[in-house]
Image (tube, rainbow, N blue to C red):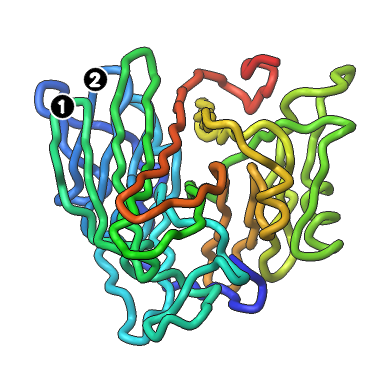
């Protein structure tokens, strides 16, 4: 999100952090009764199709690794934004000449096109371990096709495709957001040569103040300690590191790796980057908005063409938020 359009949060029941209890022989969705449940005995996921997002991913007997809330809240008539959380997908770039448009076709960097943000998703197929769904066409003429599949051993794949159903070529890239709970920690690839840019110098300085680099390790994973974030308002930064990010919560790491090669300079030229974080600490309403974001490459998508990227998700047991278990 861009600073000129400050996000508003509508309070509601928070589903994040619920332990995944229940009958082992017949598991049920915990984020919402209507959520589609996937399970393989080791990991589980839920998809809230009516708001077009993954509402849960985590170990079968552990926490939800993402923040979700208000899955029943409707979008305001004026298309104001509701922060549902979960894993949700937008298209990049957000602003500029290639950015989002409103109902009249004029450039609009915020809020997102409802069809792009909350769908609703329409089911193509579903099995015990896999789901495939589509969104309506956005105002730019792009439909989204998403596939989430559990692969065993705490691993999953998330595939995200943009299909141009319009009559004009569209330049766009995939953009996958995951909402982070306020009690979680995040890790990013960070070293002496990692470039960081953002909305302004204050955003960059605030982000760097949260970094906890490993002693004696010149490059690799660095912890982003969100408990140190004590400012008002939000800020966003981008990193030119490898397109992967990890979230720790309640004894588990959730690692997201985007597999498509990314032209960093091209993304940066349109105001984006391969890895990003938006951090807005909890204000008077008590709800923080924290996003861990990965961007895919930009592409020219002609009529009838498809542009797709893929993420690999992995769960790693770790009693503490120790980045050392994530590998080098």
Q: CA distance from mark 1 to mark 2?
A: 7 Å
Return the mark for residue 271: none
Residue 98 located left or right of residue 312: right
Q: Is residue 57 above or below residue 72?
A: above
Q: Give the image quarter of residue 105.
A: bottom left
Name the residue at 27% across, 48% down. 31
Residue 98 located left or right of residue 125: right
Of the image marks 1 and 2, the number of the one nearer the N terminus: 2
Q: Secondary structure at mark 2?
A: loop
**Residue 46 percent location from the top left of the image:** 26, 40
**Residue 92 percent location from the top left of the image:** 53, 56
The reply to whether dot 1 and dot 2 touch (C-beta < 8 Å) is yes
Sort mark 2 into few (<14), some (14-19) or many (20+) by Cα contacts within 10 Å.
Answer: some
Residue identifier under label 1: 128
Return the mark for residue 40: 2
Name the residue at 32% across, 24% down. 43
Q: Secondary structure at mark 1?
A: loop
């Amino acid at each position: 999100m861009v600073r000129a359009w400050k996000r508003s949060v509508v309070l509601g029941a928070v589903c994040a952090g619920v332990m995944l209890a229940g009958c082992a022989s017949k598991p049920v969705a915990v984020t919402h009764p209507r959520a589609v449940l996937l399970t393989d005995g080791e990991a589980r996921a839920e998809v809230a199709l009516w708001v077009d997002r993954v509402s849960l991913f985590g170990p079968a007997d552990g926490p939800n690794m993402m923040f979700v809330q208000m899955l029943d809240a409707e979008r305001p008539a004026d298309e104001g934004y509701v922060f549902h959380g979960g894993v949700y997908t937008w298209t990049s770039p957000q602003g500029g000449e290639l950015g989002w448009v409103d109902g009249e076709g004029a450039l609009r960097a915020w809020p997102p096109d409802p069809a792009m943000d909350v769908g609703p998703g329409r089911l193509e197929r579903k099995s015990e371990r896999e789901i495939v769904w589509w969104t309506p066409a956005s105002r730019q003429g792009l439909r989204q096709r998403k596939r989430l599949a559990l692969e065993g051993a705490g691993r999953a794949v998330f595939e995200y495709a943009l299909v141009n159903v319009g009559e004009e070529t569209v330049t766009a890239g995939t953009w996958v957001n995951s909402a982070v709970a306020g009690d979680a920690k995040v890790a990013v690839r960070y070293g002496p040569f990692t470039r960081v840019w953002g909305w302004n110098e204050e955003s960059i300085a605030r982000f760097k103040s949260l970094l906890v680099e490993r002693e004696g390790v010149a490059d690799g994973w660095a912890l982003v300690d969100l408990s140190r974030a004590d400012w008002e308002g939000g800020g966003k930064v981008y990193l030119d590191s490898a397109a992967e990010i990890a979230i720790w919560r309640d004894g588990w790491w959730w690692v997201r790796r985007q597999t498509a090669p990314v032209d960093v300079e091209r993304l940066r030229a349109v105001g984006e980057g391969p890895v990003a974080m938006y951090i807005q600490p909890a204000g008077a309403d008590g709800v923080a908005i924290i996003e861990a974001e990965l961007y895919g490459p930009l592409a020219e998508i002609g009529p009838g063409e498809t542009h797709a990227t893929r993420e690999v998700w992995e769960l790693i047991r770790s009693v503490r938020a120790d980045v050392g278990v994530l590998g080098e």
